[in-house]
Amino acid sequence: MKILIAEDEPLMAKTISMKLEKEGYEVISCADGKEALQKLEEELPDMVITDIMLPYSSGLEILQFVKAKNPLTAVIVLSALGQENTVEDAFELGADDYMTKPFNLTELAVRVKRLLKK
């Protein structure tokens, strides 16, 4: 199973990638929205985990792109505290789940596994 992560905080991106790789997933890591959209043009992974606030293209734009390409692709949105309205927008656009930063990596791995079983 392949997961694309769009996260502009290097430490957060590396930590998530390492956890998911340890769980047996193939991970593609993107440092900004533009890079994520380019990768998604090439291939659609089984899941996308995206931060809402990214340089160049937002997580909501990535979410829209993914759901337009394949509505069944699971998307988890990551948000900082205080972005509740944006999280509502994400669900309206088809997000499957969201987590508020900071979050527990084990909980993220459980949510990933649950969504990929569907």
Image: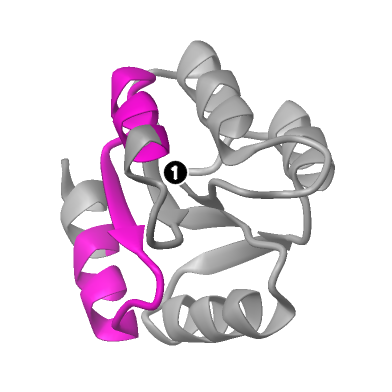
- Amino acid type of the residue tagged 1 in the rendering: Asp
Q: Position of residue 2 (x, y in %)?
A: 51, 55
Q: Nearer the viewer, residue 2 or 82?
A: 82
Magenta-drawn stretch contains 106: yes
Q: Quadrant of the C terminus?
A: top left
Q: Nearer the viewer, residue 43 or 109?
A: 109
Residue at mark 1: 46
Range shown magenta: 86-112
Is 40 situated left or right of 110 in this image? right
Q: Is residue 53 above or below residue 75?
A: below
Residue at 26%, 50% (x, y): give it.
Answer: 116
Q: Is residue 68 above or below residue 100?
A: above
Which residue occupies the extreme front position in the image?
82
Residue at 39%, 77% (x, y): give it.
Answer: 102
Residue 5 falls in image quadrant: bottom right
Is 86 situated left or right of 21 in this image? left
Crowd class of label 1 (few under 14; some 14 to 19; many from 20; radius 10 Å): some
Q: Quadrant of the N terminus?
A: bottom left
Q: Nearer the viewer, residue 106 or 9?
A: 9
Is 14 situated left or right of 118 in this image? right
Tag 1 secondary structure:
loop
Q: Is residue 76 above or below residue 42?
A: below
Q: Position of residue 65 (x, y in %)?
A: 59, 21
Magenta-drawn stretch contains 90: yes
